[in-house]
Image: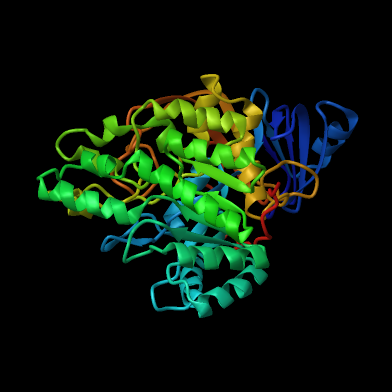
Amino acid sequence: MLFVWKGAGIVSRTVISGGLVITAADEIHADVLVEDGRIAALAAEGGPAAESWRESADRHIDATGKYVIPGGVDAHTHLDFPFGGTFSSDNFESGTRAAAWGGTTTLVDFAVQSRGQALRAGLDLWHAKSDSQCAIDYGFHMILSDVNEHSLKEMDLLVAEGVTSFKLFTAYPGVFYSDDGQILRAMQRAADNGGLVMMHAENGIAIDVLVEQALAEGRTDPRYHGEVRRVLLEAEATHRTIQLARVAGAPLYVVHVSAEEAVAEIAQARDKGLNVFGETCPQYLFLSTDNLAEPDFEGAKYVCSTPLRPREHQAALWQGLRTNDLQVVSTDHCPFCFQGQKELGRGDFSKIPNGMPGVEHRMDLLHQGVVEGRISRRRWIEIACATPARMFGLYPKKGTIAPGTDADIVIYDPAAEQTLSVETHHMNVDYSAYEGKQLTGQVETVLSRGELVIDRREFAGRAGHGQYIPRGTCQYLI
């Protein structure tokens, strides 16, 4: 890739030429003009306007033979997240740096309300964790783990200041779990204030019974984590929370959908014209219960919830992405090191911290879906950039390439070959969930608001560049 510099100091005018610009709507050969951190214009490649831009540019990036795509929007991460007596191994500095390496320029993380505490206390803590640490832009959802009159009123205040989505759980009794009445109350509040309820949909009460029975019978290995968290218990909770959302008249976003039966529940609701949305994650598209069953406790690396499913579920997830019954692919990035963290569950799978690394690989793994003919290039950008931005009130500031948008731009080499490995990734975790997997396509250069973060496969960013973004309400309602 060719760079031409004029002068020194802060670059205010950048021209990207020769690439194929891909958005959710279009694929066009065009040159892109960036001024003061925003996209100023697009022009026909090689035309007089583009030529005049190059003459006056402070920086020229030659993207010939490459894709020019919007920076990715990962709407589901857990950085510096408490779980199972430990914390996820990526903090906001390391996690956002790894995200940038993978072409993601905005993420939305989950602030946590602790039981007995106000929403505000949880949000303030997450601001303190992230302030001046992030290499890319970021926002927050709010985990609502204690639904009461005070926290319901706080929902209104948070929506007004740009925290517009709230996650509830039918799983993890005693930790995050909310009963149907609490969920209904939160949904009713969201229906009034414009918030979007996000749902971890598994029947945690029933799962706890199956966990207890499995351990009593001596079934303690990691693979039993997948066996007790039954497909039907994901489908049941998905169905139930859809009905609660119907009663409340509220939209619903189901996170980390992993099973064909849960996809069917969402598809049925959408066929009725309901504002029900579904997210899946790369681990469900590429990994399976075969990984959970790896010997010598290696399966612990793949323990996450919802769990990995038998391989035959993957086809239904890819189909859901093609038919728009699933709208978003996020990572649910929640890494725990194998040594010292995942090992907490030796002899008892229920004590293995739930979560997997992935924030660095989402864009590349989805591009592999393009290479294999599972999705189109525009659908790749739609599910990874545009729709998450629309879903969570970031569009068109984020998620597309158009005049006036933030200059979050990735130069992507569709022909590059790479092999995923713990030896080469940048996430702060001691294993790769995709060790040895060969992919075609790789991020080459990343701009965040016009500033270089990745410069021809070298990190050029800095902690503190990333800005907190107050979000609008969901822009994806039917």
Q: Residue at x 43, y 29 (%)?
A: 314
* Quadrant holding the N terminus: top right
Is 463 positioned to the left or the right of 213 in the image?
right
Residue 387 higher or lower than 467, as above or below: above
Nearer the observer, 388 or 309: 309
Occupied quadrant, residue 30:
top right
Is 413 positioned to the left or the right of 51 in the image?
left
Residue 121 higher or lower than 173, as above or below: below
Total number of numbered labels? 0
Occupied quadrant, residue 92:
bottom left
Q: Residue at x 61, y 64 (%)?
A: 190
Query: Looking at the image, can residue 242 be seen?
Result: yes
Nearer the observer, 250 or 315: 250
Q: Position of residue 265 (x, y in %)?
A: 51, 40
Q: What colouring does the structure picture have? A: rainbow
Q: Position of residue 401 (x, y in %)?
A: 73, 41
Q: Position of residue 20 (x, y in %)?
A: 70, 27
**Most extreme residue toward the right, as rendered?**
48
Query: Looking at the image, can residue 470 be seen?
Result: no
Is 194 positioned to the left or the right of 44 in the image?
left
Occupied quadrant, residue 409:
top right
Nearer the observer, 105 or 190: 190
Residue 471 higher or lower than 200, as above or below: below
Q: Position of residue 60 (x, y in %)?
A: 72, 37
Q: Residue at x 36, y 39 (%)?
A: 231
Is 442 positioned to the left or the right of 436 in the image?
right
